[in-house]
Amino acid sequence: MSLSLLCTILKKILTRGKKKVKVEFTLLAIAYNLNKLHNKIQQNRLGVSFYTKEIA
């Protein structure tokens, strides 16, 4: 999901009311960031490990 796609989605907010729009925007932001993290994990570009590898 690119930033331009996120902007396109934001133009078509499905809900009404400030509170509901805020919730919808937050969910979109979480989905966008999870997608970015997933892509970095898949391409092995994190720079840090989530866990340490122990050598026996």
Image (cartoon, rainbow, N blue to C red):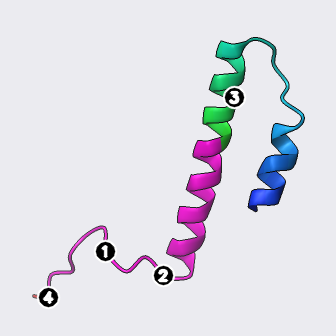
Residue 9 location, x and y as percent? 84, 43
Residue 51 part of the magenta segment:
yes
Q: Point out the tag, 4 or 1, that comes first from the N-terminus.
A: 1
Q: Residue at x 31, y 74 (%)?
A: 49
Residue 29 location, x and y as percent? 62, 44
Which quadrant would the N terminus be assigned to in this image? bottom right
Q: Which residues are magenta?
A: 29-54
How far separated are the C-alphas under marks 4 and 3?
A: 45 Å
Pointer 4 local density, CA inside 10 Å: few below 14, some 14–19, many at least 20: few
Q: Along the line of sight, which residue is nearer the eye, 5 or 34?
A: 5
Label 3 belongs to which residue?
Answer: 24
Name above or below for residue 55 compared with residue 1.
below
Which quadrant would the C terminus be assigned to in this image? bottom left
| Foreground disc of the pair 3, 1 | 3
Name above or below for residue 44 compared with residue 39.
below
Q: Secondary structure at mark 4?
A: loop
| Foreground disc of the pair 4, 2 | 2
Q: How many marks?
A: 4
Q: Quadrant of residue 40?
A: bottom right
Visible residue check, residue 55: yes
